[in-house]
Image (tube, helix red, strand yellow):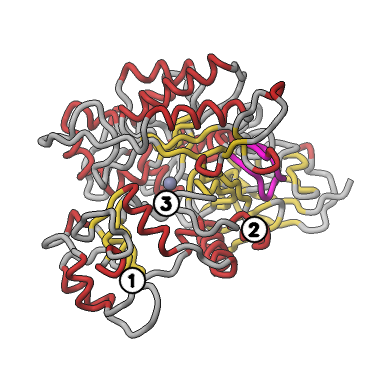
Amino acid sequence: MRLDLKLTGCRALTMDPARPAAHTIGIWQGRVAGLDDDVADLPAAETVDLGGAVVLPGFVDAHTHLAWNGRRTTDVTGLSTVEQILDRLSAPGTGWIEASGYDRRIMDRPLTALDLDRISGDRPVYVADLSGHACVVNSVVLNQLPEITSDGWLTENEQLAARTLRLPYSLDEITAELHTSARQVLSEGVTMCAEAGIGAGLIASSPLEAAAYQRARLPIRVQLMVSAHVLHDVAADPADGIARAIDLGLHTGFGDDMLSLGAMKLWTDGGMMARTAALSEPYAGTGNSGQLAEPEELMRAAIVDAHHAGWQLAIHAIGDRAVDFTLDAIQEAQRQRPRADARHRIEHCGLVRPEQLGRIASLGVVPVIQPAFLWAYGDDYSEIMGAERAPWMYRGRAFLDHGITVAGSSDRPVADGAPLRAIDFMVHRRSSSGRAVGPDEAITVEEAIRAYTLGGAYACRKEHVLGSLTPGKLADLVVLGDDPRTSDSIAEIPVLATMVGGTFAFQRPS
Ligand SMILES: [Zn+2]
């Protein structure tokens, strides 16, 4: 046997408990052919000496938004006065004025439609809030939404109504956005992304958007989550027990190792930043407990029907009340039709009371968390949760101690997408200002890496081919400039190279 590539001089942390470390990795036909002595004597078409560099399995970002992240809009991140924002948005042109990065919490006063009208003329304006759960629009937009009374600030379903006016984007636009994001994530060591919801809802781009992923032929692996809003009645044989599905009966698992269908995505509440995550007790110092996204019976029916149709579910639930609802609905779906290893996921799982942990474990639910949320917003979130609940946010240790598989993810562009930033947070539990956020939830470096490799692969039902450097699995790996187990600053470790399927798809310019 002749290998395609032999990597020597590795300090590989394989994440495979059977062989946790390796110095030599043999690659053939895009897969790991063997490690160390298995391949040491085999000839290879090419040999690369990594000079002692640390090698990990490629990072899996189990929840991200590639198209949204790659979208070119005017960036107002960090601007804190109305005048600064109007200044940034004033430019000649036609069509929609779109901006992102608005943060209402830091403003001198909230931006309104009347403010935007001063610079917009007859052009519609859409300024997206950092949270993804709110926006500010101008009067041109409000006039097209006569059922809504607002000063311009729209959240959740009202935001969706405004968003829908802008759609669709063209396949060329979406394809370009996907390539922009793929280049970025490769430079951070990510080899697979799960796109968290296409087809409908707030982050939809076009009714054709799956076609963009198919034609883009991206250099990373992508799994598409499909919005539950595209479920529709189907006239199947009653023996199938499927009342609603998507066209052709496609469901989780369709596709190949580069592009596949993942879970069906549902939204059960909002977010902490917009104070719309559904809590069982109000946000500290307020009478507001957030809100569920839709009437419970509608959401429960979608969860049960998707479960019947063979879907894995990826259910957005940030507040503990939304988590309660989600666990109840999953339990009901499993009662009606038990499916071993349905492996339903809770996206974010941002606030989990101690007594909810056992239920998550017993239902086999996978929390897909975003550690960088707390690095970026942990100070604010700690305040709005209050002292008792702050340690329950985006847990680590408690999940693992309950035998729950945790998947790391970014929700990019809502927060920093670099896996090493998230791993750093999971280990140290310090926000960007240095504040300790749930320090008892800290996990080890190896556990944090596992969340971003095997854990992510498991959440995406790809652990048989991804997540560890195991002979027979796909040759996806990342080469680092330092060892996260001994580094003082994991987030700052340079990513030297990223390999997808045996080919270097990113190499850091030297
Ligand atoms: Zn998301």
Q: Which residue is mark 1?
A: 124
Quadrant of the drawing holding the N terminus: top right
Q: Which residue is mark 3?
A: 202
Q: Which residue is mark 2?
A: 211
Q: Is mark 1 within 8 Å of ligand 1?
A: no
Q: Where does the image place residue 318, in percent across and percent down from the top left?
A: 34, 35
Q: Which residue, as the protein is rendered here, is positioned at the far bottom?
A: 92
For residue 475, side relative to residue 195 (left or right): right
Front residue of this view, candidates 168 and 98: 168
- Residue type at mark 1: give it: Pro
Q: Identify the residue shown where x is 22% and y is 73%.
A: 117
Magenta residue span: 250-262
Q: Where does the image place residue 395, in percent across and percent down from the top left?
A: 35, 30
Quadrant of the drawing holding the C terminus: bottom right
| Dot 1: element | loop
| Dot 3: element | loop
Main secondary-structure element of the magenta-colored stretch = loop
Q: What is the distance, in whole Å, between disc 3 and disc 2 at their CAs?
A: 19 Å
